[in-house]
Image (cartoon, helix red, strand yellow):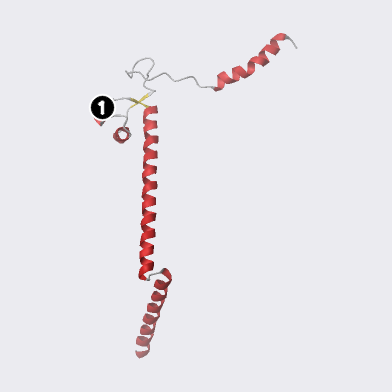
Amino acid sequence: MNINSVLKIKRLPNLMKRLMCTPPAAGPSSTPNSASGSLQQRYRPSNFQKTILVWTKKYKSKEEIPQFVSAELIERSRSEARIKISNILIALTALASFGAILAGKAAAKRGESVHQMNLDWHKQYEEEQKKKEAVEITK
């Protein structure tokens, strides 16, 4: 084995790291047509996306949003909005659960229960069936 093959083997991990890593993205520029901020890196937001950008406080109003925004900013805003909505839904679920507990306790104090409702329904059903049978017999 010669020295050149040994050097190639030693450089292989560094070469693999360079090939697998993605190059750093260029920072956003002020104009969409500049060399560092091409149209591929910029995105025209829809009205819904503008609403999300305002709701997540990236901009103060829809009028302040530029015509082109980076796709990364829109994606980050969508993620933040998703988290906010999830937190709101968690809070609403907890409140609904607490309300169901209070309603169940109030029903228990009144003497209402699913078992009693089932017994009452069966009793009513049997009475209706007896009335129907009595009407059929008299015909």
Which of 111 and 6 lies nearest the eye of the viewer? Answer: 111
Q: Quadrant of residue 56?
A: top left
Which of 99 and 58 lies nearest the eye of the viewer? Answer: 99
Q: Residue furthest bottom?
A: 138
Q: Residue furthest top?
A: 3
Where residue 9 appears, as percent x and y from the top left, is 67, 16
Query: Residue placed at 35% from the left, 70% from the top?
Result: 110
Q: Is residue 109 above or below residue 75?
A: below
Q: Is residue 42 above or below residue 132?
A: above
Query: Residue placed at 63% from the left, 19% from the top?
Result: 13
Where residue 96 appears, as percent x and y from the top left, is 36, 54
In the picture provided, is 11 more to the left or to the right than 100? Answer: right
Where residue 118 appears, as percent x and y from the top left, is 41, 72
Query: Residue placed at 36% from the left, 80% from the top?
Result: 128
Residue type at numbered disc 1: Glu
Where residue 66 appears, as percent x and y from the top left, is 28, 25
Q: Which residue is mark 1?
A: 64
Q: Residue furthest front?
A: 109
Q: What is the secondary structure assignment of the residue under circle 1? A: helix
For mark 1, does the 10 Å Cα neighbourhood hold few (<14), some (14 to 19), or many (20 or more) residues?
Answer: few
Q: Quadrant of residue 48?
A: top left
Query: Residue placed at 36% from the left, 57% from the top?
Result: 99
